[in-house]
Image (cartoon, grey):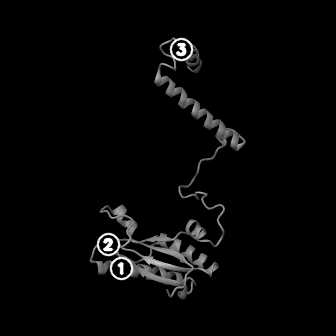
Amino acid sequence: MLRAAAARAADGSRRGDAVTNPGLFARLARFGCLAAVALGLAACSGGSVDQVAAPTATDAPAMAGLAMAPGSEEDFMVNVGRRVFFAAGSADLDQTAIVTLDKQAVWLNQYTSWRARVQGFADDSGSADVQMALSVKRAEAVKNFLVSRGVLSERLRVKGYGRDRLVRDCPEIECKSQNRRVITNLDDDDLNS
């Protein structure tokens, strides 16, 4: 098929040639691009296309922080994680939150010059006062966990924001769940300010 198409392309007077047939031209272009990508991958890997491994995990590092300094704020955000999420109406830490908070505690215990602002948020049912109290309770739960893992209480400042600073204001559960969070932000300022 490729030889026939190339022969037709050489003689632009035929009806089925790639110049006058956009469908054929598009197919040839796609084939050429795919071939170029496959050859490029094979060349980069030093082997054949069959030797190029596919990623095995969807949560593999994005390689964004290769040149970041250990102990930097970027290191904390990329390699540790600063957000934990909560079920509706709850300040209980689930297993996913505990994994993240364990990593935060290890990092904060290693880099003791950093302080942290533990900021709680809510997007649950109830009045503004109820949501403010829940956001503070969530932030306190995170602080208490970090302290239980050896982080000095004096290095952590807790604040609740209730429904202020929503990620998005929406009725869908997938969206609302993003607002039920605590964020641990590194802080090099005086905690008393």
Residue, far front: 193
x, y percentage for residue 60? 57, 57
Residue 7 is tagged as none
> Which amino acid is tagged 1?
Leu
> How far, Cα to Cα, is label 1 from label 2?
9 Å
| Mark 2 crowd level (few <14, some 14–19, many ≥20, 10 Å Cα) | many
Q: For the point 58% across and 71% down, which residue is it?
A: 73
Q: Are marks 3 and 2 in contact (CB under 8 Å)?
A: no
* Figure disc tally: 3
> How far, Cα to Cα, is label 3 from label 2?
67 Å
x, y percentage for residue 161? 38, 77
Instruction: Look at mark 2 in the image and give the residue it sits on.
Output: 124
Q: Nearer the viewer, residue 157 or 48?
A: 157
171 relative position to 137: left or right: left
Residue 168 occupies which quadrant of the picture?
bottom left
Vertical relation: 32 (above or below) 59:
above
x, y percentage for residue 132? 34, 79
Foreground: disc 3 or disc 2: 3
Q: Of helix, strand and loop, which one carries label 2?
A: loop
Instruction: Look at mark 3 in the image and give the residue it sits on.
Output: 12
Q: Are marks 1 and 2 in contact (CB under 8 Å)?
A: yes
x, y percentage for residue 166? 37, 68
Q: Of helix, strand and loop, which one carries label 3?
A: loop
Q: For the point 62% across and 81% down, which residue is it?
A: 113
